Image: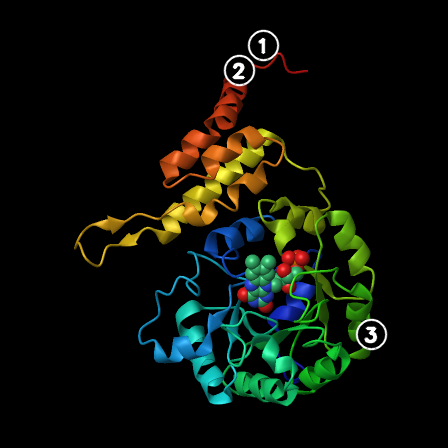
Amino acid sequence: MTGLPTPPPAGFYARRLALPGAVLAPMAGYSDAPMRRLAAEQGALWTVSEMISARGLVLGGDNEGLNLGRPYPGESGRVVQLFGADPDVLAAAVQKAEAWFSPAAFDLNMGCPVPKVRGKGGACLLQTPEVAYALVRAMRSATALDVSAKIRLGWDSDRSLEVARGLSEAGAAVITVHGRTSAQRYTGEADWEAIARVAAAVPTPVVGSGDVLTPEQATRRRALGVAAVMIGRGAVGNPWIFRALAGGDWAVPDAVTRARTALRHAELQDTFYTVPDRHRPGALRRASMRPLRKVLPKYLPDLPELHPALLQAETLEDVRAALAPVTAAGRREDAAPVGAGGRP
Ligand SMILES: Cc1cc2nc3c(=O)[nH]c(=O)nc-3n(C[C@H](O)[C@H](O)[C@H](O)COP(=O)(O)O)c2cc1C
C-alpha cells in the first residue's frame, strides 16, 4: 500500500472514446429504444436519446414511464439529451432523469432549429451562448455524471469556435458539432473543415456530425482530428455501420439477414411500446408499427417490391407477412442439408 489516493474513475465519455467505433446520433422520431438497442448490439460507442423537454420532465408529474426517456431492459451506454433554456429547470430535470432513466451521461441540445424549440433552447442558444454556459454549469451541479453539449456551427453564421471554447470552460465533457448553421437546417453539405477547426481549438473531445453515410466516409472524417464520428440518417435501417467502425467488419449483410433484422426491429417496437391499457384494466394496448413505416424499407433498399406492404403495416403480423418472401426463403436455406441446397 502506498497510501496514494485512488484516482477518480475516468468519466463515461473518456472511457468510451478510448475504444474504436462511432456514435448513434439523437434523432427525434428515430433514436428510440429499439433503434438504440440494435445500434448498441452492433458496437455503437454510445447512443443518444431523442431530445426531451426539461420543462416537460419537471412539470409533467410522474413521467417515469415516458417513452422518450425510458431505457430498454439492461440498456447501458445511453446518453439522455435534454433541451431547455432555464438553468434551474435543467438542473431539476437532470435530477429526475437520472433517477428515472439511468443514463450514462447527459447532453444539452443546442442544435434543434424547429419552431417548437426556438425561444426555449435548442439552436436558439447559439445566439445567446452565455445562457448555454450557465445551463451546462447548472446541469453539472445537479449530477456526478458527464455533461456534454451538441451544437450547430451557429445560428446563421459560424460562431462555433467561440461557443465551443465557452462550453469547454463551462466543463462540457464532450462537444458534438453538427457542421451546419441553424439557418441551413439540413440543406447543403456539413462543413467538416469547420468541425476540424473546433476540434483543434479546444481541449475538450469533439465529436463530428453530418452526412456520414458509409464506413469509408466515417474513417476519412475521423482522421480530420475529431475524437469520434456521430451517425444519424446513415444508421437508419443500417446498424451494421457501427459494426464496421467498431470491429472492422465492413461486409453488408445479405438480404435475408437484413430482413430478419427489420423484423427484429419491429418485434422490439412491439415489446417496448405495448403497454397496459389505462382505459381497460388487465388489457394491453398493442404497439403500432406506423412509426416504423419510414424505417423498415431502409433495411431493404434493393428490394423495392417489398416496400408497399411495409409502408402500410399497422401490426407486427403485417410486418411479418410483408417480409415473409425473404425471411421464409432464408428459413428454407437454413433447413437445407449441407450440399443439397444448391449453394456453392
Ligand atoms: C429526423 C431527425 C431528428 C433529429 N433530432 C435531433 C435531436 O432530437 N437532437 C439533436 O441534437 N439533433 C437531432 N437531429 C440532428 C442529428 O443528430 C444530426 O446531427 C444530423 O442529422 C446530421 O447528421 P446525419 O447526417 O448523420 O444525420 C435530428 C436529425 C434528424 C434528421
- Corner quadrant of residue 174: bottom right
The type of residue carrying mark 3 is: Ala
Residue ID for mark 2: 336
Q: Is residue 318 above or below residue 183?
A: above
Residue 162: % across, % down: 75, 84
Answer yes or no: disc 2 within 8 Å of ligand 1.
Answer: no
At a point 63% along the width and 44% down the height, the residue shown is: 240
Residue 172: % across, % down: 64, 80
Q: Which SS class for mark 1?
A: loop
At a point 52% along the width and 52% down the height, the residue shown is: 35
In this view, the mark in front (1 or 3) = 3
The type of residue carrying mark 2 is: Ala
Residue ID for mark 1: 340
- Corner quadrant of residue 289: top left
Per the model, the C-alpha gap separating discs 1 and 3 is 59 Å
The type of residue carrying mark 1 is: Ala
Q: Quadrant of the C terminus?
A: top right
Label 3 crowd (10 A; few <14 / some 14-19 / many >=20): some
Per the model, the C-alpha gap separating discs 1 and 2 is 6 Å
Circles 1 and 2, Cβ within 8 Å, touching? The answer is yes
Q: Which SS class for mark 3?
A: helix
Residue ID for mark 3: 200
Q: Give the left or right position of residue 68, taking residue 31 as reference.
A: left
User: Which of the two discs, 2 and 3, labels the residue nearer the N terminus?
Assistant: 3
Q: Quadrant of the N terminus?
A: bottom right
Label 2 crowd (10 A; few <14 / some 14-19 / many >=20): few
Q: Give the left or right position of residue 102, taking residue 130 as reference.
A: left
User: Which of the two discs, 1 and 3, labels the residue nearer the N terminus?
Assistant: 3
Per the model, the C-alpha gap separating discs 2 and 3 is 56 Å
Q: Give the left or right position of residue 323, taking residue 184 as reference.
A: left
Q: Which SS class for mark 2?
A: loop
Assign ligand 1 to one image quadrant.
Answer: bottom right
